[in-house]
Image: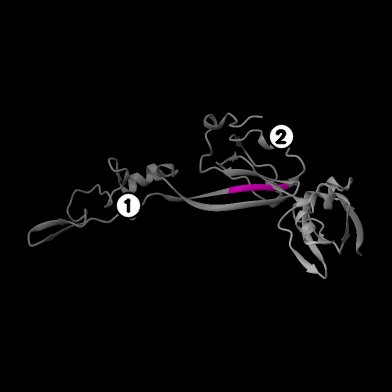
Amino acid sequence: MPFDITVSGIHLVIGEIKGNAGDEHGIASLSVPVDVPDLRTAFSLSPAAVAEAIGLGSFVLSKSRPFEQSGPRFIVTFNFEGLPGQDFPGIEDRPDQVTYEFDGEMGESPWGENPNFQALKDKYGWDKENKEFQEFLPDTDSSADSQGLSQADGIITDLGNPSPLYQSEGWEKAGATFTKTYAVATVPSSVYDGIGTIVPYPPGAENIGVPYFPGRNWLKLAPQISLRGKAILVTERHRLSGPGGYVDLAYSTAQLTT
């Protein structure tokens, strides 16, 4: 039902408010149509003043505010976002307003990082000078037949057995990034604690059944932080190590301190 408000001495009519009580992170969104007397007011009316007048002082404009003419007056639509708990005490954050994601990936890594590198070198031959696998497979037998040599018209030519790893630049290594995303009014200081250090298992990963991976650990990455209205969206991130884990001495000291 429409109702009247007065902002800066200007009579306004608030139309039917529509919105979403909260997305997956608890951030609410509202669409508020405001009937204003003239075009000048449509351009100059403060979104913050409108939000304050309807009891949503913590909500801020989230995107453009379209308007249209209605007779001699204009209808301006304000789109707001915010955390309801900042304006309505007692509405608390809930566990279901935190999202978790395990983003698996495959990426090429140098052969030297392969846990079976020595065995691969022994089997396929390694060119130390060019730091790559040899073109032909090594053979311990010195006879022409065993080395893949062919004799035609009295000329011995080296055919060899080609190596499947020749000119390959690396191997596909499995990895992953785990993220935990939530909205808050104030960023907790713990978000910055221990960035760049090793953890055996990222907090919250158990909520989506991420297992412990033998021989691997996780690195706490810098968070991603963005503003949605007056709500702050925080994404905590951890990256899975390769086989053998991150080296303790290389990541023993936090890289950011507060």
Q: Disc 2 or 1, which lies upstream in sequence?
A: 1
Q: Which mark is residue 86?
A: none
Q: The N terminus appears in which quarter of the rendering? A: bottom right
Q: Residue at x 19, y 48 (%)?
A: 142
Q: Is residue 14 left or right of residue 136?
A: right
Q: The C terminus appears in which quarter of the rendering? A: top right
Q: Please name which of the two marks, 2 or 1, marks the residue nearer to the observer.
A: 2
Q: Residue at x 59, y 48 (%)?
A: 177
Residue 3, magenta (yes or no): no
Q: Residue at x 69, y 48 (%)?
A: 181
Q: Is residue 40 left or right of residue 133?
A: right
- Looking at the rendering, the stretch of residues picked out in magenta corresponds to 177-182
Residue 76's x, y, as percent?
79, 61
The kind of residue tagged 1 is Gln
Q: Secondary structure at mark 1?
A: loop
Residue at far left of view: 154
The kind of residue tagged 2 is Ser
Q: CA distance from mark 2 to mark 1?
A: 48 Å
Residue marked by disc 1: 167
Residue 179, magenta (yes or no): yes
Residue marked by disc 2: 189
Q: Is residue 104 visible?
A: yes
Q: Is residue 165 above or below residue 202?
A: below
Magenta segment's dominant SS is strand
**Quick one: 154 or 131, which is closer to the camera?**
131
Q: Is residue 157 left or right of residue 70?
A: left
